[in-house]
Image (cartoon, rainbow, N blue to C red):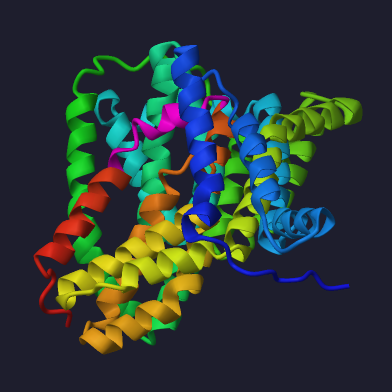
């Protein structure tokens, strides 16, 4: 039996669960004098209960059913499946010594003063090649965590900083790659080619990447020495080499992780790192480590679905498109539209698909260039996705590194600088020539 749609409520009331979540998390953190102490899942639970209670025009059973539809959405379940595989892969890779082997070779290849810039450029290249920020984070965050352990004693602040380097670089490629879901969605909704969108987009975000690279080179100047590394066990490099190679070949991320898990098992059995029971124990440990991420993902999915059904997303769209004035105003409204949609969906691809048709109408009405519009949609959705603590990327990075998502955000230089460059591109009407 279908669920009644109900009538849309007041826009601010529809959006209020998101506000409740932010208030509960921030106020509780201030009271506790510790922004890393409050579990994000607890704040989401409070906000989710509130979202169910304020929903109008539905019985309690229908409200819960709507919430459950959002929590069990196919995109949410796919994300959870990736979390499960990533946790199992990361734990088994660690137990066979793959992380230590990869860290050893990375420390030998990268000069100490260039280690930060090297990690950033590596994550930029890999994410652009494989078209997914999540895949890049899965491949590099465990290695980055190992490097942080070797270089700085593994303090949580240093670990958060190096994890943020990788997360920031992962969004550079996600924003530009020809095989990225966000690029495909942005170009299809605006009826422009990927190559044309790339030409515009690279001019907007490349200055940000150059600035951040220079910043990491400057910050790396204080790294005097690189700790001595042990001998490299080359066979244990295979899991990460295989994951990156498969991902570069365009293989589905779930297949990549499942294959990597199987390879970890073979290496572990052949080298005596663990037997069958030890392998299962390692897999279980990895999956358990992703438990909080899975709960947060489902709670966020359910809460955001109630916001959508109650008209919160429509309220944002109507508010931003009501008073457009000129081309700058039109481009800023598109940027704000996709940013707020991403805030309410926690999925940059879905945000682009949701707002793409409206953005195209604005583009045609105000004579904007569709290639610039596609770039704005992609850039601002990636900007918000990289800064929300309940987005898949930060959840994954925090889970793999074993740190709070909030601790990563304060070190995310690239998304912030990219956002500044994108806003300046709108205000200065840059680039003026796209060919």
Q: Quadrant of residue 361?
A: bottom left
Q: Range of the magenta residues? A: 402-414
**Is residue 257 visible in this depiction of the protein?**
no
Whether residue 411 is in magenta: the answer is: yes
- At 59% across and 67% down in the image, what residue appears? 8
Q: Quadrant of residue 345?
A: bottom right
Image-based side of 124 in relation to 391, left or right: left
Looking at the figure, which quarter contains the N terminus? bottom right
Q: Quadrant of residue 320?
A: bottom left
Q: Position of residue 152 (x, y in %)?
A: 39, 14
- At 83% across and 73% down in the image, what residue appears? 2
Image-based side of 101 in relation to 175, left or right: right
Image-based side of 232 in relation to 116, left or right: right
Whether residue 309 is in magenta: the answer is: no
Q: Is residue 410 above or below residue 336?
A: above
Q: Is residue 391 above or below residue 164?
A: below
- At 53% across and 66% down in the image, what residue appears? 350
- From the viewer's side, name the closer residue of 58 and 410: 58
Q: Position of residue 297 (x, y in %)?
A: 65, 45
**Is residue 87 visible in this depiction of the protein?**
yes
Q: Is residue 259 above or below residue 375?
A: above
Q: Position of residue 399 (x, y in %)?
A: 60, 32
Looking at the figure, which quarter contains the C terminus? bottom left
Q: Position of residue 379 (x, y in %)?
A: 33, 61
- At 23% across and 46% down in the image, what residue appears? 417
- From the viewer's side, name the closer residue of 57 and 213: 57
**Number of numbered markers:** 0
Image-based side of 273 in relation to 155, left or right: right
């Amino acid at each position: 039996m279908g669920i009644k749609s109900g009538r849309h409520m007041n826009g601010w009331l529809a959006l209020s669960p998101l506000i409740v979540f932010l208030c509960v998390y921030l106020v509780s953190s201030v009271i506790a004098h510790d922004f890393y102490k409050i579990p994000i899942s607890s704040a989401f639970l409070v906000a989710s209960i509130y979202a169910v209670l304020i929903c109008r025009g539905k019985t309690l059973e229908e409200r819960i059913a709507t919430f459950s539809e959002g929590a069990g959405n196919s995109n949410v379940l796919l994300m959870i499946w990736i979390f499960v595989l990533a946790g199992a892969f990361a734990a088994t890779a660690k137990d066979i010594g793959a992380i230590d082997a990869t860290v050893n070779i990375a420390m030998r290849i990268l000069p100490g003063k260039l280690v930060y810039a090297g990690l950033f450029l590596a994550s930029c290249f890999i994410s652009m090649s494989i078209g997914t920020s999540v895949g890049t984070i899965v491949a590099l965050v465990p290695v980055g965590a190992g490097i942080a352990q070797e270089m700085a004693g593994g303090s949580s602040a240093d670990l958060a900083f190096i994890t943020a380097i990788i997360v920031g670089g992962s969004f550079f490629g996600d924003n530009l790659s020809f095989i990225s879901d966000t690029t495909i969605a942005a170009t299809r909704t605006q009826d422009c080619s990927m190559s044309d969108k790339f030409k515009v987009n690279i001019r907007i975000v490349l200055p940000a990447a150059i600035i951040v690279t220079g910043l990491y080179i400057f910050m790396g100047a204080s790294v005097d020495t690189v700790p001595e590394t042990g001998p490299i066990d080359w066979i244990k490099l295979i899991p990460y080499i295989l994951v990156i190679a498969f991902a570069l070949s365009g293989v589905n991320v779930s297949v990549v992780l499942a294959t990597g898990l199987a390879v970890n098992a073979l290496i572990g059995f052949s080298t005596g790192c663990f037997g069958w029971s030890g392998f299962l124990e390692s897999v279980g440990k990895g999956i358990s480590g992703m438990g909080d991420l899975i709960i947060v993902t489902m709670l966020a999915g359910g809460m955001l679905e109630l916001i959508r059904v109650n008209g919160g997303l429509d309220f944002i769209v109507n508010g931003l498109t009501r008073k457009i004035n000129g081309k700058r105003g039109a481009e800023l409204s598109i940027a704000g539209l996709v940013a707020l949609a991403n805030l309410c969906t926690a999925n940059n691809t879905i945000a682009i698909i949701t707002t793409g048709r409206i953005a195209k109408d604005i583009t045609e009405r105000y004579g904007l260039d569709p290639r610039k519009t596609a770039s704005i949609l992609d850039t601002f959705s990636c900007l918000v996705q990289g800064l929300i603590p309940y987005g898949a990327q930060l959840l994954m990075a925090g889970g793999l590194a074993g740190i709070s998502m909030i601790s990563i955000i304060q070190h995310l230089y690239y998304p912030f600088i990219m956002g500044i460059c994108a806003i300046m591109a709108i205000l200065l009407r840059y680039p003026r020539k796209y060919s």
